Image (tube, rainbow, N blue to C red):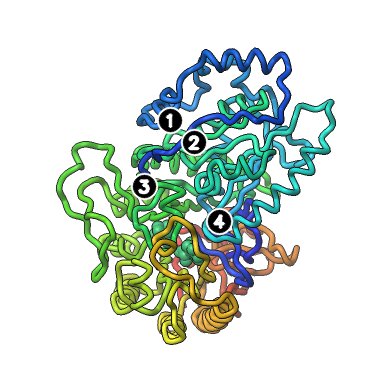
Amino acid sequence: MHPLQCVLQVPRSLGWGPLASVSWLSLRMCRVHSSLSSTMYPSPERQEDGAQKDFSSRLATGPTFQHFLKSASAPQEKLSTEVEDPPPYLTMDELLGRQRKVYLETYGCQMNVNDTEIAWSILQKSGYLRTSNLQEADVILLVTCSIREKAEQTIWNRLHQLKALKTRRPRSRVPLRIGILGCMAERLKEEILNREKMVDILAGPDAYRDLPRLLAVAESGQQAANVLLSLDETYADVMPVQTSASATSAFVSIMRGCDNMCSYCIVPFTRGRERSRPIASILEEVKKLSEQVILLPRPPKVLGLQGLKEVTLLGQNVNSFRDNSEVQFNNAVPTNLSRGFTTNYKTKQGGLRFAHLLDQVSRVDPEMRIRFTSPHPKDFPDEVLQLIHERENICKQIHLPAQSGSSRVLEAMRRGYSREAYVELVHHVRESIPGVSLSSDFIAGFCGETEEDHIQTVSLLREVQYNMGFLFAYSMRQKTRAYHRLKDDVPKEVKLRRLEELITVFREEATKANQTSVGCTQLVLVEGLSKRSATDLCGRNDGNLKVIFPDAEMEDVNNPGLRVRAQPGDYVLVKITSASSQTLRGHVLCRTTLRDSSAYC
Ligand code: 5AD
Ligand code: SF4
């Protein structure tokens, strides 16, 4: 995992953004809003030139507000991201990017990294170019996070820096346009436009298809926004452009939104209701990734024919996946939950569930590792656990976000389980999947959390002994149930002290858990050179822990006698010699394949 800094396009991060002194990341990771949702805001400060007058007159004869609501909320049946016909107040030329250069900056969770690529895929088809040089940009888009206040503060600070860039821009260049995308756009809506006049466009998480239109409107000096949430937008047909530096792995979005309404969480309000992508389109994307040609960094540098070696299925509640798109599966079969767990919503029925998807995805390529994140502990019925146990290429790694070790706090959080039910699930998971690696999220200092509750959380960390942990201080969010019904009564210093204590205990326990690997031989998927040393390579074991080992020649088990050096995308066997709370070290034994090898102790 990654140090908790501002997550700027960190490809492997499985977590929401940074918090205080925590040093790990986790993942994570509506009904159509009735309020003003898709509209344009004239900026009084901006002078109309001739072109703008022309635009304004076309705007006056353009569509009504209803038009926007209709087009933005209608079920998206389109199966193409080809550039659409322009709305009546724009010409085709205005809708196209005209080679304008877009700079995208991502904050927050892995879902946002994926959303960035979706947004880029849409803009690229509209004729925009991408730049990684801020100074070169004509359009700057920030893909934002609202999960905690600190995440939003980072964006406000960034906006102030960008304001200076916009003001200093020479008149000889096209005016710089700035956009806020994602959760913060959704949460704050017009407030951003009113507070920061230099923001030109706002696009909520379900409005990325509208980006070309929003930018075209912004070209004329108007502010433009679309923050409509959708019941069915999954961007199923938009293949994200995978720009990750990693030649080994990719993320595939399988569902969006959350129906759980945990009392502390803003996500259901910013990302809307749960909806799943049809299985057929997920399988198509995974197949393409498994066939993707990759360029190897060292000789023979041939275009690698092996394709990507790891796919992580992504979703806010990834294991609540339910594909209702095929009518024949929409029967009345009730949903199996983990034992002792309940939902905050009416039980759903029918559809193709996560176990079915996992089965299908893992069959695409037996050499491709499958991971998924972020799950909810309530959705681990036996069929999912059994499949993870049986299928060689599904990683034995499960994220089980507990949030607290106190049943009293869990109830206030509306998590739908008690400490006892959670601990029972942990035992059941460990019995079903021997050797499974476990991780969790915890919140320190939730409303009403007493010292005794905190001690319960410490004891849960000791009892479970997680391999990875993502720990946060509670941050009250408007709109949530906690905001309306509870009191944020744990002082900031107490929250931070408890957080530090949780981090210390987590580290001690993770070190112990990881040290059980010393002396074992593990299968590692090579990612590339270690960041700290040019003579070391770095990869991940099945549990997703980073493994560092010297870059040495080794035997290739499939070509006896051949000596090779590892390339990104190779599977190698590594003998583990030491372990810390976040990393394993060892020496490489041989190059192998996922099917031919089995890790052993
Ligand atoms: N304050 C602190 N942490 C939060 N999380 C979600 N909402 C909040 C909040 N308001 C944490 C939870 C979740 C993770 C992604 O972020 O632990 O699992
Ligand atoms: Fe937030 Fe709970 Fe949904 Fe996770 S499951 S996104 S914590 S509401």
Q: Residue at x 75, y 29 (%)?
A: 175
Disc 2 and disc 1 in contact, CB within 8 angstroms: yes
Q: Where the N terminus falls, by quadrant? A: bottom right
| Tag 2 secondary structure | loop
Q: Earlier in the sequence, mark 3 or mark 2?
A: 2
Quadrant of res 548: bottom right
Q: What is the x, y in percent for residue 144? A: 58, 49
Residue that label 1 marks: 72
Residue 443 image position (x, y, % from top left): 48, 71
User: Which three-letter amino acid code belongs to the residue tagged 2?
Assistant: Ala
Between the C-alphas of marks 2 and 1, the distance is: 8 Å
Q: Nearer the viewer, residue 323 or 499?
A: 499
Task: Give the residue number, with chain letter if any, for mark 2.
Answer: 207
The residue type indicated by label 3 comes to Arg
Classify mark 3 as within 8 Å of ligand 2 or not, answering yes or no: no
| Cβ of mark 4 under 8 A from ligand 1 | no
The residue that mark 4 highlights is: 559
Residue under the image location 70 percent in, 50 percent down: 158
- In terms of sequence position, does the residue under pointer 4 or pointer 2 come before the other? 2
Nearer to us of marks 1 and 4 is 1
Q: Position of residue 59 (x, y in %)?
A: 56, 17
Q: Are marks 4 and 2 in contact (CB under 8 Å)?
A: no
Residue wearing tag 3 = 273
